[in-house]
Amino acid sequence: MAAYDRFYKGDIAKEFVRGVQEQGGLITLQDLANWKPVEEEPVHVSYKGIEVYKLKEWTQGPSMLQALNILENVDLKSMGYNSPKYINTVYQAMSMAFADRDFYYGDPNFPPKEPIEGLLSKAYAKQRASQLDQEKNNPLIGPGNPYPFENKINPYTELLEHRGFENNDSTIRNFLPKHDGGALALADDLYQDRLWRGTTSVEAADKEGWVVSITPSGGWIPACIAGKTGVGMSQRMQSFVLDSTLNPFNVVAPGKRPRVTLTPSLALKNGKPFLSFAVQGGDTQDQNLLQFFLNMVEFGMTVQQATEAANFNSNQLWLSLGGKRIKDREPRAGNILLHENTPESTRQTLKKMGYLLSFDDRTSGPINAIWFDWKHGSLWGGSSNHGEDYGIAW
């Protein structure tokens, strides 16, 4: 508490605020002094008997839970790992979940109240699953209507009917935020590399059964440093919206948290820890973690195999970070990133299904995970080969 008081009320706080305001920032000493850590109940769903827990709807975490609910209605295992049918199905489930994320998620401590109960209901997921197109991608997937599943009327029906996005089929996106322009302008690949490294995931467990999953981020390079503190100021405010037609729950306001991409994860099976897992990578985080989870649960991979396995990334969502204009962040329908080792037959089939393909040797952030083997009384660590990640055991 002494360290807490010094940072938020003492000399560090004073220098931080001076440095912020010197650069045009709005944070005051009162803001820091009023801040307190809040203990929140996580949200969770059950996927085939496995309870998966995420942070609340001020993060993108529930989008993975929504996708799991939808996919529970489908026989994924029979489709085969990364088959065209599997990719098409999971891609659309993610598109539905992210469309809801982009419109309905925000800080639950501020009105209006997010319809999270409806969003995470099995009945709503079953309705969404019935809309999956088995033959081709649906470029018009948008937010659903979870309110009836809370026995409520959607107050945003008219807004949803009049909104939308241009079905831009460009495979090129400008990921470079405005504050990185000018003399600090970075090539897209370099900026992406820094974005991957800007987040840290930490998974830890001990023999007593204590488990943590942590995903801190913000102030990544290049960052504005607050005075002489050495503290990089967060860039997360860019994840707010200014236009309520984009998301009435995530409009910027004093004291409000922006809807962030950070998404640590825990799963329980039979009341015991099953998985602790997290990853870096902005909007791709819950895409990567969804596929990692399915790799283990549906396809029987070990935790290490699942962290290294090739997956795919969707751009059919509103970007949370980067871009100089609203248009830069619009969903790119059917835009998909595949691993460069994807078979030619799969590539051709996906093209016929309406996908625009791009390829890379890296299709995931660095996934870190711990799997609990209760049968043999051991812990298995997994860490992908996509970053400066590793496991330590003693």
Image: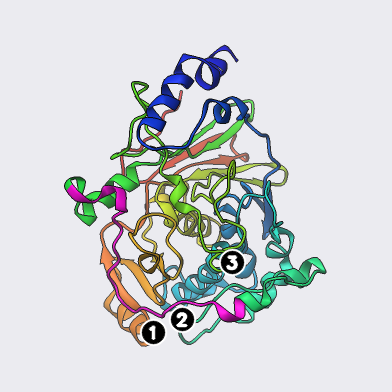
- Mark 3 falls on what kind of element? helix
- Mark 2 and mark 1 in contact? Answer it, CB < 8 Å: yes
Q: In the rendering, which numbered label is found on residue 139?
A: 2
Which residue is pictured at 45% across the width and 18% down the height? 12
- The answer for how far apart the CA atoms under marks 3 and 1 are is 22 Å
**Mark 3 belongs to which amino acid?**
Asp
Q: Select label 3 or label 1 by which is in front.
A: 3
Magenta range is 160-182
**Mark 1 belongs to which amino acid?**
Gly
Left or right side of 5 for 284: left
Residue 305 vertical placement versus 92 (above, below)? above
Residue extending furthest toward the left: 183
Q: Is residue 353 visible?
A: yes
Which residue is pictured at 35% across the width and 39% down the height? 220
Q: Is residue 385 visible?
A: no
Residue that badge 3 annotates:
100
Residue 366 vertical placement versus 76 (above, below)? above
- Mark 2 falls on what kind of element? loop
**Mark 2 belongs to which amino acid?**
Pro
Horizontal and vertical percent position of residue 232 = 37, 32
Q: Nearer the viewer, residue 289 or 191?
A: 191
- The answer for how far apart the CA atoms under marks 2 and 3 are is 15 Å
**Label 2 neighbourhood size at 10 Å, few (<14), some (14-19), many (20+)?**
some
Residue that badge 1 annotates:
354
Horizontal and vertical percent position of residue 274 = 61, 44
